[in-house]
Image (spheres, rainbow, N blue to C red):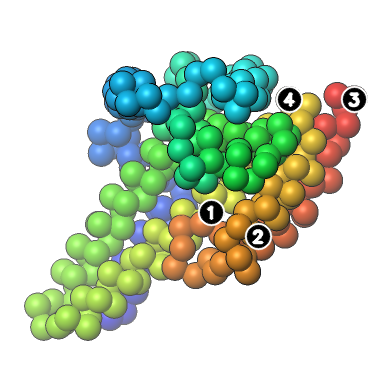
Amino acid sequence: MKKLALSFCAITVMTISGCASFADMAGADSATLNAQSAQSFAKMTQEARAKNQLDTSSSTYQRINSVFLRLKPYADQLNQTGQRFDWQLAVLKSDSVNAYVAPGGKVVFYTGIVNKLNLSNDEIAAIMGHEMTHALEEHAKSKIGAQALTNLAIGIGTSYAGTNIGDLGNAAINLGSQIGIGLPYSRNLESRADYGGLMLMAKAGYNPNAAISLWEKMNRLDGAGGASFLSTHPSNTQRIGDMRKNLPAAMAVYNKRR
């Protein structure tokens, strides 16, 4: 078991420092991921258009698109991936309270997140900045590397433990790899996207205070703030607390534009 513990410690260090590099070695380099993302995004928008689910004209679409266009040049300035992003936006007609980004700058918003939460443009910018930061920091690529490392950790742990470990031992290894590597890493990426999004929206002239009001609305929708344990996302309450700590730095950037 000492060898098993040492294996997990070594893998954890690799996760923190080199998941993106590990993804490159696994064949998930930036150019490849961006190209695959572009193909998937094109297919998704084509299917959504055929089903009349692609919004290209409503007032909700126009507001989301205006925020997207305003943030885009500032996002380009922050791009250090070595790959030029072909930023694209798809707005889907859906009551889902959701938004996401794919590698290379493919942003998807559901109308429900704006309409159900009655978001201001500044609050839309908080979501947009968060998603753009995920793409700029290549968090999808990092997660691929983290998953590969997690799988490696499970393999090493099982190998060291031997064949007599039993179901409970296997469950412990799987849970250990999840808690020790996967979940904290995913939460860390979410926190980084929160911070990066806060600074990005400030650079574009959107009030960073809106990031806090956004998550307060999410809190009321979710109820009680949720729990971050065994979740890939920090709780809404935790996010709000972190954003309050980062607000002075973001407001300094915002106030320079005024």
Residue at x 41%, y 66% (from the top left corner) = 180
Neighbour tally class for label 2: few under 14, some 14-19, many 20 plus, Cα within 10 Å: few
Of mark 3 and mark 4, the one earlier in the sequence is 4
Marks 2, 3: nearer the viewer: 2
The answer to whether marks 3 and 4 mark residues whose Cβ atoms lie closer than 8 Å is no
Amino acid carrying label 1: it is Asn
User: In the image, what residue occupies the spot 28% across and 37% down?
Assistant: 25
* In the depicted structure, whether residue 118 falls above or below residue 78: below
Amino acid type at image mark 2: Arg
Question: Identity of the amino acid at label 4?
Answer: Ala
Question: Which part of the image, by quadrant, shows the N terminus?
Answer: bottom left
Distance from Cα at disc 3 to Cα at disc 4: 11 Å
**Badge 1 is on which residue?**
188
- Side (left or right) of 173 relative to 248: left
**Residue 258's disc number:** 3
- Rounded to the nearest angstrom, the CA distance separating label 2 from label 4 is 28 Å
Decide which of 207, 152 is in the foreground and name it. Answer: 207
Q: Which tag, 2 or 3, sits closer to the chain's start? A: 2
Element marked by disc 2: helix
Query: In the structure shown, which secondary structural element does the residue marked by tag 3 occupy?
Result: loop
The residue labelled by disc 4 is 204
How far apart, in angstroms, are the residues tagged by discs 2 and 1?
24 Å
Q: Separation of disc 2 and disc 3 at Cα? A: 32 Å
- Whichever of labels 1 and 4 marks the residue nearer the N terminus, that label is 1
Query: Alpha carbon of mark 1 to alpha carbon of mark 4: how far?
Result: 24 Å
Indicate the position of residue 165 as horizontal and vertical percent values: 16, 82
Return the residue nearer the eye: 184 or 202. 202
Viewer can see residue 31: no
Q: Which residue is mark 2?
A: 220
Which residue is at a point 22% across and 83% down the rendered structure image?
Answer: 168
Q: Earlier in the sequence, mark 2 or mark 1?
A: 1
